[in-house]
Amino acid sequence: MNPMLQMININKSFATVRVLHDVSFSLLAGEVHALVGENGAGKSTLIKILGGVYSRDSGDILIDGEEADITDVPSARSYGISIIHQELMLAPNLSIAENIFLGHDIKTKLGLVDINEMEKKAQGMLDGFNLSLHATDKISQLNIAQRQMIEILRSISFGAKIIVMDEPTSSLSEKEVNVLFDAILRLKKSGVGIIYISHRMSELDVVADRVTVLRDGHYIDTVKMKDTDHEQLVSLMVGRSMETFYVKHPHFSEKIILEVEHIKSGSMVKDASFTLRQGEVLGFAGLVGAGRSEMMNCLFGLAKVESGKIFLDGNPISIRNVREAIQMGFGMVPEDRNQEGIFPVQSIRYNTTIEVMDQFLGSGVYNAEKEYELAKKYLDDVLATRYSSLEQSIASLSGGNMQKVIFSRWLLSTKKILILDEPTRGIDVKTKTEIYRLIDNLTEQGLTIMLVSSELPELINMSDRIVVMSHGYTTGVLAREEFSQEKIMTYATMEM
């Protein structure tokens, strides 16, 4: 079978930095071809060249065997190429129908927008994918999974025959992931080729036919998924075997530094209780909607505690805002780094040191040298962050390096308890290992970690104890010797 897409010896440089070195990639009709590699491996650059966001320096792109002249996004779309980005590109105040046909509205004979026809066609697409939605529903009313399905339908409405999915399950529950996989199967059967970018190996087992690995901007190998395993893929991605993926040693004492008693907050946290020991990693498990992130928001001053008690070092406390939380020794790496974790128009330096600016403004005098030294100490020495200048925009970084900047900020300012909400979501295997090693080092140095994660292997391998929540309630607290996915899921699905 001849490929529907061929990218041959693609090269790309930004200024003096070469980011793609003779990279080749192909896609068959009705195939899911996964593209994997560490953050910074070149995946995003290759896809942006395909989508017309970047121009290639050299190399060829063939669609159905013919040279494709892709110079911008419209020209890529004219070849049937659609990219569904990790950050969904929908207009929240418009309806589903308006979003699906945004940019190519159906017109009447008089040249007016035919909203009735758009809603009729959109409803047919929704029904065809068994989505219990109405074409007139506003995007703002939809959850992440439903919005993702609208992005897929939007691609289909443009006549896309090549669809790129960039970390499509990063914010989805298990049930929502299954809906997405059903949609992918339908697309395959209709002959659509899918380029699937993901760091989750278990997903590749389910959806991928082939996998291409990039490393440091170089093409490494393409293998059939049925002929490989996770260990081989990880080895290809990082250039060495990974005998030790998780890095974990017990560093906790029996000293209780935080006590949470029967906390209630809004509709998501109904009755949460737990204790936190000095130097431990306390994991938080639960399904989507269990109230874990909302509980963390209470401790970081982002949500109001309506009832219940919190004790820090045995003393009752009331956390009214983020500033008070920081002063009490809390830090937080949030779940959504793009929306909640960064100042996107600001520099790496600004994003790293913003919480400790008082250290560089003694007596009203700004000490730039001290600021740069501290920022580089954490970015370079502690976290091995890849960047070209402290003054470059943080938004220009890969997801993993962006996460390292956010970590650096809170390592500079956190004195007691660091809250990590989905800290490895959407980042590569190598960076995950670096973060696991950092967590272990931090607890060895006396910091205490609260780890929220939807990945049970991560919780099981990195936690000293695990608090399980369900529907806003604490349903179980497990010691390390009690850990198992089955037991965690039993508590996570418990009705109160």
Image (cartoon, rainbow, N blue to C red):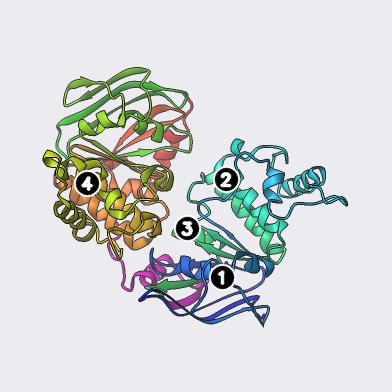
Asked which secondary structure carries label 1, the reply is: helix
Compared with residue 240, is residue 123 higher up or lower down, i.e. above or below?
A: above
Residue 248 visible in this rendered orientation of the protein: no
Front position in the image: 255 or 360: 360
From the viewer's perspective, is 272 left or right of 101?
left
Residue 223 falls within the magenta-colored stretch:
yes
- Identity of the amino acid at label 2? Ala
The span picked out in magenta is 218-247
Asked which secondary structure carries label 3, the reply is: helix
- Identity of the amino acid at label 4? Leu
Q: CA distance from mark 2 to mark 1?
A: 25 Å
Q: Which residue is mark 2?
A: 145
If you read the primary sequence from the N terminus, does the residue marked by circle 4 or circle 2 appear first?
2
Compared with residue 152, is residue 127 higher up or lower down, i.e. above or below?
A: above
Q: Which residue is mark 1?
A: 50
Q: CA distance from mark 3 to mark 4?
A: 31 Å
Front position in the image: 493 or 325: 325
Asked which secondary structure carries label 2, the reply is: helix
